[in-house]
Amino acid sequence: MDSSQIQLVPHRRFNPLTQEWVLVSPHRAQRPWLGKVEDRPGSGQCEYDPKCYLCPGNERAGGARNPRYKSIFAFDNDYPALLADSPDFERNEDHLIVARSERGICRVVCFSPRHDLTIAGMKPEQVREVVDCWANETEALAAIPWVHHVQIFENRGALMGASNPHPHCQIWATSTVPTEPAKELISFLQYRADKKSCLLCDYLRLELQRRERVVCENGSFAAIVPYWAVWPFETLVLSKRHAQDLSQLTAAERNDLAAMLGGLTRRYDNLFETSFPYSMGFHQRPTDGLNHEQWHLHAHYYPPLLRSATVQKFMVGFELLAMPQRDLTPETAAQRLRDAGETHHLDK
Ligand code: H2U
Ligand code: ZN
């Protein structure tokens, strides 16, 4: 079947990173949408919020007081999901009741002292400082012998569970490699054993040739709606060089990554003229002391919005019980993100 026919008929697509399938139903996207077009929520934030626990100089919920920071501020989460000193234990009753201890360190990083900014609205040099912070945090956490994985993630918007609009992300360092990166690790290893090359280097080359799903690119990074995308406007941000983690990036690559994240999030905002919610995060090599040369640094953006600022995708029904499904094809999503442009709608 050629690629134009596939735009019309239900089919499954394979995710080579997780080795899972997604059901694509492009014919359904042609059904008319009779839903209301909702009002756009404005940002409505001020530069400083005296009640915000992340703004400079304010007291946090845990009682600590933030310094009057001028650019980036990283601190240990006052309500960490993991503890560095969890006791070691294992429980196994007939392989049915199974548990193991997990140690971890949770950090919070404020991207800016400004309460009202987002990555989309920050200057490239400010985002560059965030990239440097991520790289430094990764290196420092990776140096702790029992830390075997560092997960950087940003929940943006109340819809995605962010507790506060102040621009920030979280970092969870764990003693084991969590489920999603563990699946990817197996895929990278298998692909390298089979093909003697890198899964994401090969995939990036293919996408840059076809250009059907490329959203934007610069000298060091490209953003693609992956062939197997589950979320409506999901993207994969790939480093063009085969690097394993953020700390290996050169100054030029860090600038390019900062520019890429700014541009991509402005495209998202422009799509529905809103402050686009998403969960994003980097997948870096495990930090278990091995080289993991097969790993390819990348970031995933998982935004839930489907048709407007208020119509979102829910993983329910068939998706919850059987497998993920989408109507809008990744090719159409990529076209819309290309058309959205990088000049922010509020600056026009
Ligand atoms: P989210 O918006 O993604 O939930 O991140 C905010 C984090 O900030 C959250 O993990 C922490 C929460 O535990 N936090 C503090 O560390 N100190 C506080 O005073 C409030 C919130
Ligand atoms: Zn704030």
Image: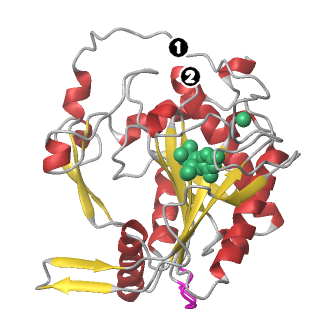
Relative placement, left or right, of 139 versus 274 is right
Residue range (magenta):
286-293
For residue 40, the mark is 1
How far across and down, in percent of the image, does residue 30 sit? Answer: 24, 22
Tell me if the residue at label 1 has its CB under 8 Å from ligand 1.
no
Look at the image and say whether residue 291 sits in the magenta stretch.
yes
For residue 274, the mark is 2
Determine if residue 154 is in view. Answer: no
Relative placement, left or right, of 332 versus 118 is left
Q: Residue at x 71, y 76 (%)?
A: 140
Quadrant location of residue 134? bottom right
> Would you say the magenta stretch is mainly helix, strand or loop?
loop
Q: Secondary structure at mark 1?
A: loop
Query: Vertical placement of 128 versus 266: above or below?
Result: below
For residue 261, the mark is none
Look at label 2 and name its amino acid.
Thr
Quadrant location of residue 329? top left
Q: Secondary structure at mark 2?
A: loop
- Disc 1 + disc 2, Cβ < 8 Å: yes
